[in-house]
């Protein structure tokens, strides 16, 4: 593993342990060249996923990109990082176990929307505003009205 501080290629593992959900290995590393310490995570990747964008362009699935968008929607909300990480892991597991190598951005977006509605309604609306490309305040109003209508129907059942 290359040191992120000095670029030295021979770093040493000082401590390894599974993460709380046992879906990754957390490793504390030490660089003998500069003395820096840093953490890496090792995850199982079941298959190589390709994301198919709306314009047909394809790119490799980037977990970090997905994480940034979810954490951005949850920013300054009272949500523990562990809950967000758990939702992110769940989305990735569902994508990898779907049996498909090509995943549409719509599929990913709907999975994120489902995870965020369970976490926090404000984060859900924030993400939806970008995902559904809201253009004016009325778009927010209609979305929130539809969201509340769905809740009332669920409460009546």
Image (cartoon, rainbow, N blue to C red):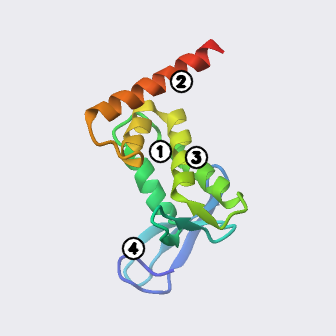
Q: Of callouts 4 and 3, which one flags the residue occurring earlier in the amino acid sequence? A: 4
| Crowding at mark 1 (Cα within 10 Å: few <14, some 14-19, many 20+) | few
For disc 2, the marked residue is: 150
Q: Of callouts 3 and 2, which one flags the residue occurring earlier in the amino acid sequence? A: 3
Mark nearest the camera among 2 and 1 is 2
Mark nearest the camera among 4 and 1 is 1
Q: Is residue 22 above or below residue 16?
A: above
* Cα–Cα gap, marks 4 and 1: 25 Å
**Residue 101 position within the rendered picture, expressed as x and y whole percent measured from the top left:** 65, 67
Examine the image and state in which quarter residue 152 appears.
Answer: top right
| Residue ranking furthest to the top | 156
* Cα–Cα gap, marks 4 and 2: 52 Å
* Cα–Cα gap, marks 1 and 3: 9 Å
For disc 1, the marked residue is: 81
For disc 4, the marked residue is: 36
Q: Is residue 28 above or below residue 135?
A: below
What residue sits 60% from the left and 56% below the top?
92
What residue sits 43% from the left and 79% below the top?
3
């Amino acid at each position: 593993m290359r040191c992120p501080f000095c670029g030295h290629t021979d770093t040493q593992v000082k401590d390894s342990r599974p993460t709380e959900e046992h879906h990754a290995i957390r490793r504390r590393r030490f660089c003998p060249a500069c003395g820096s310490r840093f953490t890496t995570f090792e995850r199982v990747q079941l298959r190589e996923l390709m994301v198919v964008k709306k314009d047909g362009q394809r790119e490799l699935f980037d977990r970090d990109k997905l994480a940034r968008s979810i954490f951005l929607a949850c920013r300054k909300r009272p949500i523990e990082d562990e809950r967000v990480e758990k939702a992110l892991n769940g989305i990735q597991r569902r994508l990898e176990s779907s049996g498909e190598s090509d995943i549409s951005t719509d599929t990913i977006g709907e999975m994120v929307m489902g995870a965020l509605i369970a976490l926090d309604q404000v984060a859900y609306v924030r993400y939806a505003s970008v995902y559904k490309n809201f253009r004016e305040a009325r778009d927010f109003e209609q979305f929130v009205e539809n969201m509340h209508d769905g809740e009332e129907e669920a409460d009546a059942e």
